[in-house]
Image (cartoon, rainbow, N blue to C red):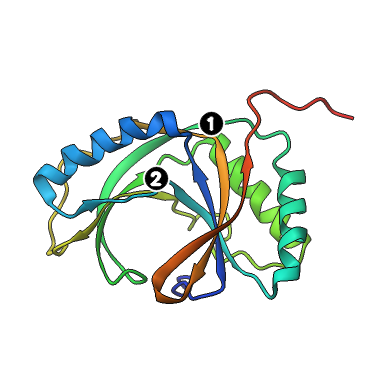
Amino acid sequence: MKQSPRVARPGDVCILLEPNINEIPRVRSLQRQLQASLGGHPQERVHFTCQRFGLPDDASLPLVLQALQKQLANVVPFPVHADCLQLVEHPFWEFCVLRWDLDRTQEMWCFAESVDRALVEVGMAPHYPCGDGWRPHVTALEAIASANGHHVNGTHRGQLLYTARRVALSQVMEGKRFEILATIELKETLALMR
């Protein structure tokens, strides 16, 4: 039986996939619609966590960045669509969240596989290996009173959330805070092969 990844802890680094700032208003509108019926508050930083890994020391960060830049050089921005809505108890935050589970498109699979290859190349073990159990999601609302067996109406299947345009490396700090260590912009067009 496959084991769930451990809960994030200080020092872990998350690889986030984010939209550009122009797409945030669309997501905020969707969050407000959901908040009106379920409460809670909108997730501030719109993203999905593609991967998480342990960073053994600060000297390893440049190696990870170099490997990611190499693996993602030909990855172009791609749409992020919802597959369904889920209310779940979140073990890290210790409260209930509403999330959009994402449609795992071919572009998303290719991106996730590239990220995994980059980490393995520099000796980092991915916490969410790409495969059947990989379930990417975007948190819509946080701190909902309780899931209480409540089922969210509607699947939101196919709802465009945003276009993935930027990769951010975010390190978990003490006190459930995060620090952005670096960002990588996805290219609008394919880079010329050399």
Residue at 12%, 50% in the rendered image:
38
Q: Does the residue at mark 1 contact the one at mark 2 (Cβ under 8 Å)? A: no
Numbered badge on residue 89: none
Marks 1 and 2, how far apart in space? 15 Å
Rendered image quadrant of residue 92: bottom left
Image point (77%, 63%), residue name: 122
Of pointers 1 and 2, the one earlier in the residue sequence = 2
| Amino acid marked by disc 2 | Val
Could you tell me how many numbered marks the image carries? 2
Query: Looking at the picture, how far across and down is residue 4, in whole percent?
Result: 45, 71
Give the amino acid type for the residue marked by disc 1 in the picture: Phe
Of residues 111 and 183, which is closer to you in this image? 183
Q: Quadrant of residue 90?
A: bottom left
Secondary structure state at the residue bearing disc 2: loop
Q: Which mark is residue 78?
A: 1
Q: Closest to the observer: 130 or 165?
A: 165
Q: Residue furthest right?
A: 194
Residue at 77 percent of width and 52 percent of height: 66
Left or right: 157 as drawn, with respect to 2: left
Crowding at dot 1, Cα within 10 Å, few <14 / some 14-19 / many 20+, comes out as some
Q: Is residue 14 left or right of residue 188?
A: left
Q: Quadrant of the C terminus?
A: top right
The residue that label 2 is drawn on is 46
**Residue 191: x percent and y percent?**
76, 27
